[in-house]
Amino acid sequence: MRVGHQPGFDRLVFEFAQSAAPGTFGIPAYTIEAASSLSGPSGQPVTINGNALFGTRFQNASTQNPNGTPSYTGSTDMKPTTPLIKQIKLVEDFERVLLWGTGLDHLACPKVTELAGPFRVVLDFPTPP
């Protein structure tokens, strides 16, 4: 996962490697929704900085390989210095469901793009020019 600013938008990228599970490949099924709060598996709300919140949920995805070794070693709680994205935090990694919370300075609907080589889901949140 990485985040950056380009003229006119803040970009959030989720990247997926080829799965170690047999027969599994590509971008996992996902949903992206504005939310008033996000909770992890315990049911307790997770605090995320910002005035607006998005949840990005991936099914059949994990930060661990099937053998228990890490498949993702990056940050699980980022506070970038971008104009719109204020925080990205891993809310849930349980039973092959990943939920990332994204806190924004204000509500903005992202343009979503899927890319291959490597597999990526790209969210471009518009910012003032």
Image: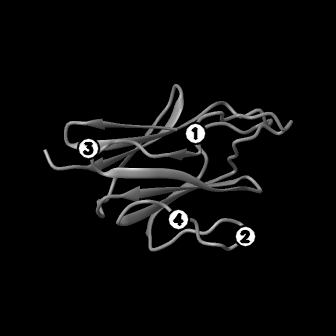
Measured Cα–Cα span from mark 1 to mark 4: 16 Å
Foreground pick, 99 / 39: 39
Measured Cα–Cα span from mark 4 to mark 3: 24 Å
Q: Which residue is mark 3?
A: 9
Along the horizontal axis of the image, is 90 left or right of 8? right
Measured Cα–Cα span from mark 4 to mark 2: 14 Å
Check disc 4 and give the amino acid type.
Thr
Q: Residue at x 22, y 49 (%)?
A: 127
Along the horizontal axis of the image, is 65 left or right of 105? right
Q: Which residue is mark 4?
A: 47
The tag earlier along the polypeptide, 2 or 1, is: 2
Label 2 SS? loop
Q: Please identify, in this view, whether the residue under mark 2 or under mark 3 is nearer the observer.
A: 2
Tags 2 and 3 touching, CB below 8 Å: no
Picture coordinates of residue 84 (x, y %)? 30, 51
The tag earlier along the polypeptide, 4 or 2, is: 2
Q: How many other residues sit within 10 Å of disc 4, few (<14), some (14-19) or many (≥20)?
A: few
Q: Which residue is mark 1?
A: 75
Check disc 1 and give the amino acid type.
Ser
Picture coordinates of residue 78 (x, y %)? 49, 44
Q: Please identify, in this view, whether the residue under mark 4 or under mark 3 is nearer the observer.
A: 4
Picture coordinates of residue 106 (x, y %)? 29, 62
Label 4 SS? loop
Q: Which residue is mark 2?
A: 42
Q: Residue furthest right?
A: 67
The tag earlier along the polypeptide, 1 or 4, is: 4
Q: Residue furthest left?
A: 129
